[in-house]
Amino acid sequence: MVDDVPSLREPDLPRTAKVRPKALRTGWTTGTCASAAAKAAASLLLSGEPPAWVEVALPSGRRVTFAVESTVVADGVATAVVVKDAGDDPDVTHGAHLTATVSWLPAGDGVELDGGEGVGVVTRPGLGLEVGGPAINPVPREMITQAVREVVGGRGVRVVISVPGGEKMARKTTNRRLGVLGGISILGTTGIVRPFSTASWRASVVQAVAVAAAQGEQTIVLCTGGRTEKGAMALLPDLPEVCFIEVGDFTGAALRMAVERDVGRVVFVGMVGKLTKLGAGVLMTHYTRSAVDTGLLGRLTSAAGGSQSLVDDVAAANTARHAYELWQAAGLLRAAGDALCARVRDVLVAFTDGAVSASVAMVDFTGKTVVAATEPGWVS
């Protein structure tokens, strides 16, 4: 008999570390860089003098300074470029030329904000932005407005943010699936990019669940990566693409949003490593924050009818994959895998206090073949 569903935790930080890693360099969000470009363009429009540097405020109130890459002014229109530095974060927009074009409004006041080349257009509800408008999130909008106001005061201006090459960059993001077409989104909540930021991925997962819910979908499919997502799509071909979410390590964040948006069913598709962590009650499954509990796999082996020697070998396995291979060699992959999937299902339901139902499938290491599941008909 396997232990009851464990207490849930997210994240589970390691208690010890032999080597203190070198600090990684922080960077700036597209929103911060866009606000700097907008301020530089507004300053050029007002004074006619091209600024070499501009200072803008982050949402925290901290002020930071940016070099202005280039400027041009002609016929009452000023343009300025700030190059995005994402620090040590593997960001597809690192090096992007955030470009702001500013002109006077013929009448009225306020800052009229729009998107140009390379900035996506919102085509679906659920993002908190106007459908048909530019994908410039609320915090960056506030930052851009404040930055321009610091220069022009109450005078009315039109600001167009563009990102040359942004449409190509967007192909490496989830924008199309979320209904953001034609370019990247101008993002950021703090103005700062933390290296290998969990915040940005967590935010994209939460946003993806919200978009699916806004389409009226009652099932979301959480996948740990590209291979598992392809397997999930083959398994559930009748679901629209918006239902499939690369959740990475942020299962807990996705579940909370599913509850908040009244999404009634969650399907989780993953490989043995992530499933083992979830089965142990760890909702933040990044390898640096939690370890695989092979002891749990040993207990599942026993519950599935494995011999004591196999139980001992699995409990002492080097990795979850090693345990998987031991199950496979012993002809116990289906039985033990089904037990693991059932365990994960119970954890997901418990995490939401029963607000969602859950189904779980384990795929092989190609991501193409379902080898165990809570739904018998899913197994190849």
Image (tube, rainbow, N blue to C red):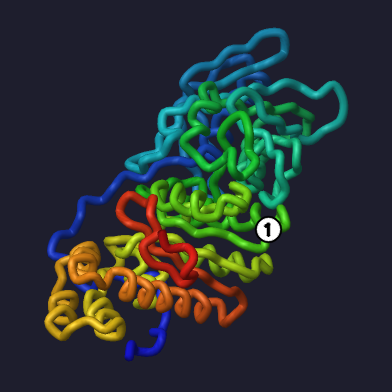
> 232 above or below 308?
above
Q: Position of residue 298 (x, y in %)?
A: 23, 80
Q: Report helix, strand or loop for mark 1.
A: loop
Q: Nearer the viewer, residue 172 or 59?
A: 172
As drawn, the residue found furthest toward the right would be 107
Q: Residue at x 50, y 39 (%)?
A: 173
Residue type at tag 1:
Glu
Q: Residue at x 62, y 23 (%)?
A: 117
> 312 above or below 211?
below
Residue 60 in view in this figure: no
Looking at the rendered image, the quarter that the N terminus falls into is bottom left
Q: Position of residue 210 (x, y in %)?
A: 64, 57
Q: Position of residue 4 (x, y in %)?
A: 39, 89
Q: Is residue 9 left or right of residue 312?
A: right
As drawn, the residue found furthest toward the top would be 75
Q: Nearer the viewer, residue 97 or 68?
A: 97
Q: Is residue 289 left or right of residue 20?
A: right
Q: Is residue 260 left or right of residue 297?
A: right
> 377 above or below 340?
above
Q: Residue at x 41, y 47 (%)?
A: 226
Q: Residue at x 56, y 69 (%)?
A: 256
Number of labelled discs? Answer: 1
Q: Nearer the viewer, residue 138 or 92?
A: 92
Q: Position of residue 352 (x, y in %)?
A: 56, 77
Looking at the rendered image, the quarter that the C terminus falls into is bottom left
Q: Quadrant of residue 262?
A: bottom right
The residue beneath circle 1 is 217
Residue 280 in view in this figure: yes
Label 1: few (<14), some (14–19) or many (≥20) C-alpha neighbours in 10 Å: some
